[in-house]
């Protein structure tokens, strides 16, 4: 129970803290409102249960770094419970003879037990995490010195961690000590075993001293909150509030790889892509506040891990520090002082992204740094006509001959020479339309996949057809290279063709084609049922229409293409068709949702890599370590990249598409 002067001081301090907190929240709200697009509040109603589950369980943080995540969870769970604990302490301090535990009896005992246990868990967890950051200085919590970072971040993140760590220890530690003083003065509380245990330390103190200790610890526990909250909103720890908001309000996408459509029909639109912070979507600005600065996205980034100057974490952190510094101008409608390329991410890093989606997939708070990067590419290409010279060849090929290999449409069916492959003209009502794709139709190595899949379809008696010369590139490479207008033209042309054909289902041997047709064409009026060829092969084998036979024991390792697995969630089908009594699948350390990129995505197929090593070589080396004889893939881009890596390594391991593996077994 506080004295009257204490109550007056506490209320006055609370009002001051609330005023400064309101001002900061108002500025943050105005900044987010400067972002493009509108919030769809109806999504919140649909997602609330899932978001609560995700927030309370902290499930996304446990995907990697299990032990540190557990200590972090101790703190986060305590924070959640302490929202009620602190309110209770304030009410008991301000209202005479009010006892919350008695008011909610018989739940008062369990409430005190939970608070007691979590207090100790949080203090222990905080000490471990401070040890990890400041003593062990884990490499997982920092970035290389060649990465562009706001000069203030190198010391600012450590300072924030130290301040927040000290706050948590003082806040929770003081409250815990206060409970131990109460137990020493009023008697042991069986529902608070840790506080009661500590009460033994104060057995020789007088009642006056214990009462003084209770008052001092009250002010240390709750007074520090009043001081800390305005600062808290400037620090990375505001993610405690913005992470749930991110999950609750993030715009809906067909998949994490789907990009937002640009409106080329709007004659008043004079900005395509993103140049400055305010050009970003509102959700991309909110990402800056949700960011934990944990570097998990950097940890899984194939570009960063092969020495490129790209760190998705650094970009998000730079955005946040810039908002702290220049946010007032943006909040009041002004133009940000610098472009994103000047403070957030260098152009070299923008062009190093493979668009693999690993950063989005792993982020524990739902941030999407890949989208920022690809939006910046759009601005560079469409507004500045500035892009790697090597892209010009692919762009020209797609513009003139509708494929990045620049092969004339009249030669698009050359891959099928000697095979019976019906076209839509000869078979206008197929059950399956096979979208062959540019690589299988034009690249010498990928053509072998197309021929293998054709033999499978013919062996199973599938009623299918291909578009032949009418098929154009889906535009995936153009879109991910930033040439959105070229993608737009290709998409409209393909949609017009497909809508006339009206296929019941489409099958592709390329995950990039599958993703584009399935997830990105709906925004332009093309809504189709699209499956990957591994899924169709699995259907045919399950139904008994295909009965491949192996020829002796073979060890196989499987590479999960980014746009098949992580982007579209197809992991089982490729494994199920390969697995049999004679084939042993040996998984690489990074597989399934954690698969490492081949290096071709994000239009990297068409340019040379910078950095310390090739992404494809990194991945192929991992495959070699399994001791497998065959590296199976399910993507023509992966095939080309990893086969080149095999040649570079002078390896005897075969790199085969899953269709080639099955076709060989059918020949047996």
Image (cartoon, rainbow, N blue to C red):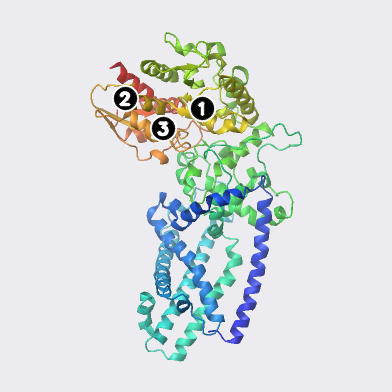
Residue 652: assigned label? 2
**Which of marks 3 and 2 precedes in the sequence?**
3
User: Tag 2's secondary structure?
Assistant: loop
State the separation of the CA atoms marked 2 and 3: 15 Å
User: Tag 3's secondary structure?
Assistant: helix
Indicate whether 123 appears above or below 282: below
State the separation of the CA atoms marked 1 and 3: 24 Å
Bin the neighbour count of mark 3 within 10 Å (Cα to Cα): few under 14, some 14-19, many 20 and up: many
Q: Quadrant of the C terminus?
A: top left
Q: Nearer the viewer, mark 1 or mark 3?
A: 1
Q: Quadrant of residue 382?
A: top right
User: Which residue is found at the position 50% from the left and 24% from the top?
Assistant: 504
Where is residue 377? Give x, y as percent.
61, 36
Indicate whether 440 appears above or below 141: above
Where is residue 16? Give x, y as percent.
66, 73
The reply to whether discs 2 and 3 touch (Cβ–Cβ < 8 Å) is no
Relative to 117, is 219 on the left or the right? right
**Which of marks 2 and 1 precedes in the sequence?**
1
State the separation of the CA atoms marked 1 and 2: 30 Å
Residue 656 seen in render? no
Q: Quadrant of residue 555?
A: top left
Residue 22 seen in render? yes
Residue 617: assigned label? 3
For this orientation, the residue located farthest to the top is: 418
User: Which residue is found at the position 24% from the left and 28% from the top?
Assistant: 582
Q: Quadrant of residue 193?
A: bottom left
Q: Which residue is mark 1?
A: 513
Nearer-the-camera pick, 139 or 313: 313
């Amino acid at each position: 129970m506080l004295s009257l002067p204490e109550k007056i001081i506490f209320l006055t301090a609370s009002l001051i803290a609330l005023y400064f907190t309101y001002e900061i929240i108002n500025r943050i709200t105005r900044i987010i409102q400067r972002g493009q697009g509108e919030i769809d509040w109806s999504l919140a109603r649909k997602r609330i249960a899932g978001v609560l589950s995700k927030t309370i369980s902290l499930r996304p943080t446990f995907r990697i770094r299990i032990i540190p995540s557990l200590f972090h969870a101790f703190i986060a769970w305590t924070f959640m419970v302490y929202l009620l604990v602190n309110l209770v302490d304030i009410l008991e301090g301000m209202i005479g003879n009010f006892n919350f535990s008695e008011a909610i009896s018989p739940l008062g005992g369990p409430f005190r037990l939970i608070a007691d246990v979590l207090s100790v868990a949080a203090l222990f967890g905080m000490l471990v995490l401070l040890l990890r950051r400041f003593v062990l200085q884990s490499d997982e919590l920092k970035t290389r010195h060649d990465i562009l970072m706001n000069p203030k971040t190198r010391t600012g993140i450590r300072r924030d961690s130290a301040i927040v760590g000290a706050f948590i220890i003082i806040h929770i530690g003081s409250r815990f000590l206060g409970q131990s003083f109460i137990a020493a003065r009023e008697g042991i509380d069986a529902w608070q075993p840790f506080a009661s245990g500590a009460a033994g330390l104060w057995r020789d103190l007088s009642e006056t001293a214990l009462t003084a200790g209770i008052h001092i610890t009250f002010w240390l526990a709750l007074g520090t909150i009043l001081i800390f909250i305005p600062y808290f909103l400037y620090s990375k720890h505001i993610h405690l509030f913005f992470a749930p908001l991110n999950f609750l309000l993030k715009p809906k996408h067909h998949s994490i790889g789907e990009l937002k459509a640009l409106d080329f029909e709007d004659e008043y639109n004079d900005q395509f892509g993103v140049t400055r912070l305010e050009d970003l979507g509102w959700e991309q600005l909110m990402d800056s506040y949700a960011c934990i600065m944990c570097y998990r996205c950097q940890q899984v980034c194939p570009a960063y891990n092969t020495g490129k100057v790209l760190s998705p974490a650094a970009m998000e952190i730079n955005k946040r520090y810039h908002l702290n510094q220049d946010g007032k101008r943006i909040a009041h409608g002004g133009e940000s002082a610098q472009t994103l390329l000047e403070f957030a991410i260098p152009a070299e890093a923008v062009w190093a992204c493979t668009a693999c989606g690993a950063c989005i997939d792993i982020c524990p708070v739902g941030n999407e740094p890949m989208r920022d990067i690809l939006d910046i590419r759009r601005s560079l290409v469409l507004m500045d006509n500035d892009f790697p010279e090597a892209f010009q060849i692919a762009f020209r090929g797609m513009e003139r001959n509708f494929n990045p290999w620049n092969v004339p449409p009249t030669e698009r069916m050359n891959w099928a020479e000697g095979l019976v492959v019906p076209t839509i003209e000869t078979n206008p009502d197929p059950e399956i339309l096979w979208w062959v794709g540019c690589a299988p139709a034009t690249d010498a190595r990928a053509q072998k996949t197309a021929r293998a899949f054709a033999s499978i379809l013919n062996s199973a008696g599938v009623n299918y057809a291909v578009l032949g010369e009418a098929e154009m590139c889906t535009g995936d490479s153009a879109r991910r290279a930033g040439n959105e207008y070229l993608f737009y033209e290709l998409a409209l042309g393909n949609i017009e063709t497909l809508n006339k054909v009206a296929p019941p289902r489409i099958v592709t041997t390329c995950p990039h084609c599958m993703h584009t047709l399935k997830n990105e064409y709906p925004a332009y009026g093309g809504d189709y049922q699209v499956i990957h060829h591994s899924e169709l092969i699995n259907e045919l084998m399950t139904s008994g229409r295909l009965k491949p036979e192996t020829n002796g024991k073979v060890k196989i390792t499987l590479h999960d293409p980014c746009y098949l697995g992580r982007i579209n969630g197809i992991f089982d089908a490729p494994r199920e068709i390969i697995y049999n009594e004679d084939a042993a699948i040996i998984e690489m350390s990074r597989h399934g949702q954690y698969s490492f990129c081949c290096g071709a995505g994000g239009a990297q197929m068409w340019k040379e890599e910078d950095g310390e090593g090739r992404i494809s070589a990194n991945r192929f080396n991992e495959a070699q370590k399994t001791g497998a004889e065959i590296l199976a893939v399910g993507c023509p881009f992966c095939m080309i990249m990893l086969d080149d890596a095999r040649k570079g390594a002078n390896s005897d391991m075969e790199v085969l598409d899953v269709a080639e593996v099955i076709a060989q077994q059918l020949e047996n």
